[in-house]
Image (cartoon, rainbow, N blue to C red):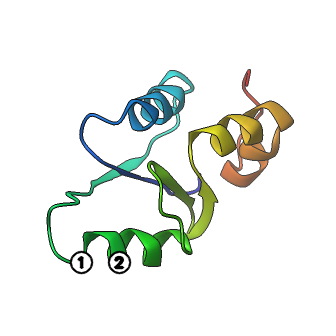
Amino acid sequence: MARVTVYATPFCVYCVGAKRYLARRGIPFDEVRINLMRPGARDRIQAASGGGRTFPQIVIDGDPIGGFDSLRALGRSGELARRLGSPPAAG
Protein backbone atom coordinates (compact mmCIF):
# COMPACT_ATOMS: atom_id res chain seq x y z
CA MET A 1 0.00 0.00 0.00
CA ALA A 2 1.14 3.54 -0.71
CA ARG A 3 2.45 5.79 2.04
CA VAL A 4 0.03 8.55 3.07
CA THR A 5 1.21 11.59 5.00
CA VAL A 6 -1.13 14.18 6.49
CA TYR A 7 0.40 17.54 7.37
CA ALA A 8 -1.86 19.02 10.03
CA THR A 9 -2.14 21.76 12.60
CA PRO A 10 -3.69 21.38 16.04
CA PHE A 11 -7.40 22.24 16.30
CA CYS A 12 -7.97 22.25 12.52
CA VAL A 13 -11.40 20.77 11.78
CA TYR A 14 -10.44 19.86 8.21
CA CYS A 15 -7.35 18.09 9.51
CA VAL A 16 -9.50 16.09 11.92
CA GLY A 17 -11.91 15.30 9.07
CA ALA A 18 -9.15 14.05 6.79
CA LYS A 19 -7.63 11.84 9.48
CA ARG A 20 -11.06 10.47 10.39
CA TYR A 21 -11.83 9.80 6.70
CA LEU A 22 -8.62 7.80 6.31
CA ALA A 23 -9.02 5.95 9.61
CA ARG A 24 -12.62 4.91 8.90
CA ARG A 25 -11.46 3.36 5.64
CA GLY A 26 -8.58 1.54 7.30
CA ILE A 27 -5.98 3.57 5.42
CA PRO A 28 -2.81 3.92 7.48
CA PHE A 29 -1.18 7.35 7.48
CA ASP A 30 1.60 9.30 9.08
CA GLU A 31 0.70 12.60 10.68
CA VAL A 32 3.14 15.48 10.69
CA ARG A 33 1.97 18.17 13.08
CA ILE A 34 2.93 21.65 12.03
CA ASN A 35 3.28 24.40 14.61
CA LEU A 36 2.84 27.63 12.66
CA MET A 37 4.47 29.59 15.48
CA ARG A 38 7.83 27.98 14.73
CA PRO A 39 10.13 29.72 12.27
CA GLY A 40 10.12 28.03 8.87
CA ALA A 41 6.95 26.00 9.50
CA ARG A 42 5.05 27.56 6.59
CA ASP A 43 8.05 26.96 4.30
CA ARG A 44 8.19 23.32 5.38
CA ILE A 45 4.56 22.64 4.52
CA GLN A 46 4.82 24.44 1.20
CA ALA A 47 7.89 22.41 0.24
CA ALA A 48 6.27 19.11 1.23
CA SER A 49 2.97 19.85 -0.47
CA GLY A 50 4.15 21.34 -3.72
CA GLY A 51 3.13 24.85 -2.71
CA GLY A 52 -0.02 24.22 -0.65
CA ARG A 53 -0.70 26.85 2.00
CA THR A 54 -3.83 25.52 3.69
CA PHE A 55 -4.34 22.61 6.07
CA PRO A 56 -4.38 19.74 5.92
CA GLN A 57 -2.02 18.93 3.11
CA ILE A 58 -2.10 15.28 2.10
CA VAL A 59 0.68 13.52 0.25
CA ILE A 60 0.50 10.02 -1.23
CA ASP A 61 3.87 8.45 -2.03
CA GLY A 62 5.42 11.89 -2.35
CA ASP A 63 2.66 13.19 -4.64
CA PRO A 64 0.73 16.12 -3.12
CA ILE A 65 -3.01 15.72 -3.57
CA GLY A 66 -4.25 18.79 -1.66
CA GLY A 67 -6.58 18.97 1.30
CA PHE A 68 -9.63 17.25 2.73
CA ASP A 69 -11.96 18.13 -0.17
CA SER A 70 -9.47 16.73 -2.66
CA LEU A 71 -9.11 13.56 -0.58
CA ARG A 72 -12.89 13.00 -0.59
CA ALA A 73 -13.12 13.69 -4.32
CA LEU A 74 -10.42 11.08 -4.98
CA GLY A 75 -12.32 8.64 -2.79
CA ARG A 76 -15.61 9.20 -4.63
CA SER A 77 -13.99 8.82 -8.06
CA GLY A 78 -12.12 5.61 -7.15
CA GLU A 79 -8.81 7.33 -7.80
CA LEU A 80 -7.80 7.12 -4.14
CA ALA A 81 -8.06 3.33 -4.19
CA ARG A 82 -6.03 3.21 -7.39
CA ARG A 83 -3.30 5.38 -5.91
CA LEU A 84 -3.24 3.30 -2.76
CA GLY A 85 -3.22 0.03 -4.66
CA SER A 86 -6.33 -1.22 -2.87
CA PRO A 87 -9.95 -2.04 -3.77
CA PRO A 88 -12.28 0.98 -3.80
CA ALA A 89 -14.08 1.85 -0.57
CA ALA A 90 -17.22 3.91 -0.26
CA GLY A 91 -16.31 7.60 -0.81
- Residue at 39 percent across and 30 percent down: it is 13
- Residue at 51 percent across and 57 percent down: it is 3
**Residue 80 pos. (x, y %):** 72, 44
The three-letter code of the residue at mark 2 reads Asp
The residues bearing labels 2 and 1 have C-alpha atoms spaced at a distance of 5 Å
Left or right, 29 with respect to 86, comes to left
| Residue 40: image tag | 1
Viewer-nearest residue: 53 or 59: 53
Looking at the rendering, in which quadrant would you find the C terminus? top right
Mark 1, Cα crowd under 10 Å, few <14 / some 14-19 / many 20+, is few
- In this rendering, the answer to whether 82 lies above or below 47 is above
**Residue 17 pos. (x, y %):** 47, 28
| Residue 43: image tag | 2
The three-letter code of the residue at mark 1 reads Gly
- Residue at 45 percent across and 26 percent down: it is 20
Which SS class for mark 2?
helix
Dots 2 and 1: beta carbons under 8 Å? yes
